[in-house]
Amino acid sequence: MVVATKLLTRTQYKDTDKQFNMIAASWIQFMIHDWIDHMENTNQQVELIAPKEVANKCPLSSFKFYPTKEFPTGFYDKEYPDLNDEELYRYARLVTSAVIAKIHTIDWTVELLKTDMLLAGMRANWYGLLGKKFKDTFGHVGGSSLGGLVGLRKPVNHGVPYSLTEEFTSVYRLHQLLPDSIHLRNINVAPGPNKSPPLLEEVPMPDLIGHKGEKTLSQIGFTRQFVSMGHQACGALELWNYPSWLRDLVAQDVDGKDRPDHVDLAALETVYRDRERKVARYNQFRRALLLIPISKWEDLTEDKNAIEVLKDVYGDDVEELDLMVGLMAEKKIKGFAISETAFIVFLLMATRRLEADRFFTSDFNEETYTKKGFEWVNTTESLKDVLDRHNPEISKKWMNSTSAFSVWDSPPNAPNPIPLYLRFPSS
């Protein structure tokens, strides 16, 4: 709770400017909860009590919660009128999953790590160095480098059953992306400059979560909510930008019932859970990734205020630095919304998720997906494509940006005559 109060809690909201919007934040929320799950041991409770030095600054002086439970994972209109409901559902689920994976690879991640080098790398993951036009014409040719990971003859597991690790869970804790309120836009008037709708009202985030949030969002409606989120930047992944309203949160059981004990999510999820699940502290985490560890606080950040508070919390022992604090304190690579340390884990798993899955390798074909389903996967390049297909009036009227994940009133990407793989990295 000391770490959460002194280093994480939001003091003044910082956003990502035009790079990443609230749709991008909501996208990764649903992706993470689709990828990862943890069970709680409801037979016992743990209580965290705020130390005296921060008790008057904590929304909760103490709170109770359930510890993590260990459990075995077990490694292991209508286009087709002849298909029954169950068959249609299974094909649709497969096609939708592939479209989501593709959007995440060559659209969401590209906006998160906004450089030509990462754009080239993520497109090479899907299409290979020969590119989309070649692959669409001749199919998968060569190995993963030339033809991409998608369409390989068989899955690649590197001798280890596929899994998402606790380290992956840790770097995907991105609550700082959440703002303090959603800026609702007026979509009943003509767009302003750069297709920007005027601000109607600001709705506090606590009114948009839990049972109250379900009612509020149903009143707002899909179009207004989606357009509003598209035009609002999400929070920056930095120190002192963790939402204060998440430090006094009503948790719910799996059946949707409110729990009697409120929780401090900053203390629980960003610090306690990593320690409980034996995730390495920041320096050891970097060593495990073959990255250079820090030997002094000045190696981590140039922010003198941050260095002063880090010394206050951890003294001179840099080995005690919690992973989340280190990830938020790191100086970012130009164009990156995340830290270098988190990026390495992102990069490894972005590749692993594709090459280890038979539905993206040996079974990535028309026979498995159906001809129409396979066409949908191959012709969808972005979330904007999905929006254009199902709600074309939204993107036509309200979106100025190239990607649905960047702030919608930002300028579209300028055309570049230089082929992607021949561009020099920008400094």
Image (spheres, rainbow, N blue to C red):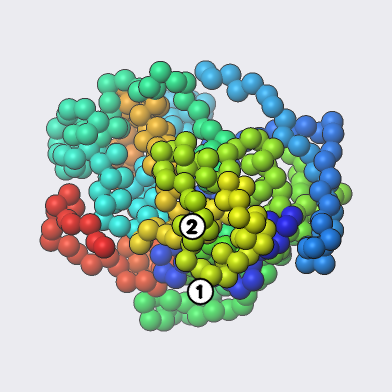
Front residue of 35/246: it is: 246
Left or right side of 38 for 172: left
The residue located at (48%, 57%) in the rendering is 300
Left or right side of 139 for 78: right
At label 1, the amino acid type is Ile
Q: Is residue 171 above or below residue 220?
A: above
The residue located at (71%, 52%) in the rendering is 267
Front residue of 123/116: it is: 116
| Residue at the disc numbered 2 | 300
Disc assigned to residue 187? 1
Asked whether disc 1 touches disc 2, contact meaning CB atoms under 8 Å apart, the reply is no
Q: Quadrant of the C terminus?
A: bottom left
Q: Quadrant of the N terminus?
A: bottom right
Q: Is residue 249 above or below residue 34?
A: below
Count of labels shown?
A: 2
Which sits earlier in the primary sequence, circle 1 or circle 2? 1
Q: Is residue 92 above or below residue 158?
A: below
